[in-house]
Image (tube, rainbow, N blue to C red):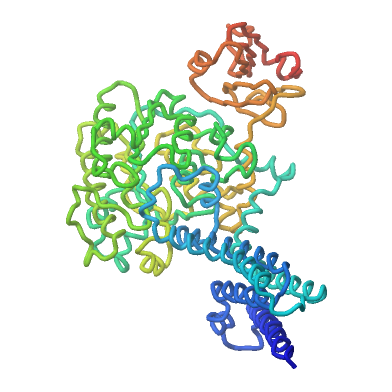
Amino acid sequence: MKSQPLLVRNRQGWFLAFISIVVFAAGALAYFHWPGSLNPLDVDDAIDALVDWHAFGALVVLGLVVLILSTRSASMIVLGLFGFVYILFWGVWLVADMMTGVGINQSVLFHFFSGTEGADYSQFWREILVFAGFVALALASLVLPVLKIRRHRRHPRTPRRSSARSIMASLALGGLLVGTGWLASPWHRDLMALTRTYSLLDGDQERRLEALYDTDRRTVSRDKNLVVLYLESFEATYFDERLFPDLLPELRELRQASTHFSGIAQTPGAGWTIAGLVNTQCGLPLVTPGAGGNDMGRVERFLPKAKCLAEYLGENGFETVYMGGASGEFAGKDRFLTQHGFDIVRDKHYFQEWQDATHSEFSGWGAYDDELLERTYAEFVELSKQDTPFALFALTMDTHHPHGHLSPSCEGVRYRDGEIRTLNALHCADRLVARFIERVRRSPYYADTRLVVLSDHLAMVNDAKELIDRADKRENLLMLFDSDVAPGERRVQGTMLDVGATLLSLMKADRTALGFGRSLLEQPMPTTRSYTADYYTTGDVTEYLSFARGLWDMPTVFGEIRSNGKGVLLGDNRLEAPFFSVLNEHNKVVELYFHNFAEHIDGLKEGARYLYALECEESLRGDSAGVCLVSGLKGAGERVFSSTELIDGILAADIL
């Protein structure tokens, strides 16, 4: 009779575990497979409270706890391990969703690989606390079974132990519970969506995308200089007077005086700052290369096979300058800029040296926007006094999520009651950016200047989210100030990938397509397939993401080297000429450049091997057309191969 209470307790534990699993599975099945025709009401609305992901997660964890308490063997540690993994992923997804609003996406993967050096962690204390709580809960799921085992060993109440059958049943139920919860979880959905971007392209897909990906040389008019101002998270939605009355009065007026676009959507591979730069500069979605030796934490070259706007401008004699108040190390921004055509990159460190400022004069991200715009205007004036054409790019920071920052010159600026800090920062930015635009337009150099103001991406989750979510449609901002282009609104179907091509069109380039981007000034866009056309017709741009991922790969020189008259085939990779590459001892390209060849050769160490291709000149074997290849060993000399030899094919072993 004494064993009866124990038996009852064991049966109650199993009963509770079983009921938890049944309820959870029933809810999941109802949510995903309930035939809507059987119920005239919206099934999602009817059971929304029951199938909320956090309720699901709590039910999974509760079921595991019941199973652990009902198990009397060391197998409960396995159940604790199930819980640890599930809770940890739950926490990662929740924090990612708090920051992106869309769970785990490419921006999360990118920063996982590249790191977050230079970020303002003080802005994310809530996310840090939430994640710390989930880590503690995950660890508790491991500690609970360990403590239970130690307690039973120190104070054994009965010699009875769980049978092998009950142990297997316990593990099976735990596995079923976690497995079902995992498959129904939002992070499983997000990870499956991301894996599609890492699928390999077949030959037909790759050839079609290579034909659409435009990196051909082009001539850009030098009649005017270019000034481009990126506004952090500053989407066109903030101009909606129904949602944000009188938030941007000065910029609203200036917008009417500009050529401004509506209909610029945010697509996969966009949505955070470095992605916005890659989208608009290269006409590419930004996709991380994935895990491995070429991950973002170790890669020396940022998208080495891409060719971007600043590089084309440099080839046409423009001096290219970037100015940003945040650290260039954040997300590999400095590597991208310096490796893709920018002659001068000035970031947080420049402002610290220039200003000789104390820490109090900087936000957690870096220099405030009032200082940034002041120095950017001064740079504009200095560059305008020179004879060399220039392209000046700047990126603001004060409106960064989740709360923004107020520049010192905006002390006391509040939007309405001032409760929403992001809107205060935007209200301040309205004043600062409008002043910058007006100074440029009123300067004696404006007649020779094209001014562009745009967002880098849509706003991430911030304290104005509730208002933003009420918008009928969210769009990116793009305003052009150029006396050669009539002001007014242009309704388009575009993406951020089209911005760089639009700038080339604005600058009267003889070829405006850039990467996968097409000019928005040439609307209606061609009816042929393109990234933007595919996005608006099918919504599926997975092939483009897979292609963009391949642009991280460095070629290995092997087999036969050939030329098609424009580019050179190195191994499995085709590079457009001109290019300069440095090779390691395994014949793998470790550095790749598209300009300033002499400078890169001078910077090499003695004995370094290099390979470069360029249009043939009389000094190189007398060929009048085509591409020539030069193989060199620093300090030992060079060997030149003519375009005819390249077309016929050269064995890699003969040149290395």
Left or right: residue 223 versus residue 590 is left
**Residue 86 picture location, percent across and down:** 62, 64
Residue 455, percent from left and from top: 38, 49
Q: Residue at x 38, y 69 (%)?
A: 466
> In this rendering, would 164 be left or right of 21?
right
Q: Nearer the viewer, residue 499 or 436?
A: 436
Image coordinates for residue 274, horizontal then vertical, percent: 46, 44
Residue 548 visible in the displayed image: no
On the rendered image, what quadrant is the N terminus found in? bottom right
The foreground one among 603 and 14 is 14
Residue 118 versus residue 494: which sits nearer the camera?
Answer: 118
Q: Is residue 240 above or below residue 258?
A: below
Q: Nearer the viewer, residue 548 or 526?
A: 548
Residue 89, image quadrant: bottom right
Spot occupied by residue 287 in the image (x, y as percentages of width and height): 57, 46
| Residue visible at 35% across and 28% down in the picture | 390
Q: Is residue 568 visible?
A: yes
Residue 136 position (above or below residue 548): below
1 vs 493: above or below: below
Residue 38 shown left or right of residue 228 in the figure: right
Displayed quadrant of residue 612 = top right
Tell me the quarter of the image containing the C terminus.
top right
- Horizontal side of 239 relative to 286 (left or right) equals left
What is the count of numbered marks?
A: 0
- Position of residue 97 relative to residue 558, above or below, is below
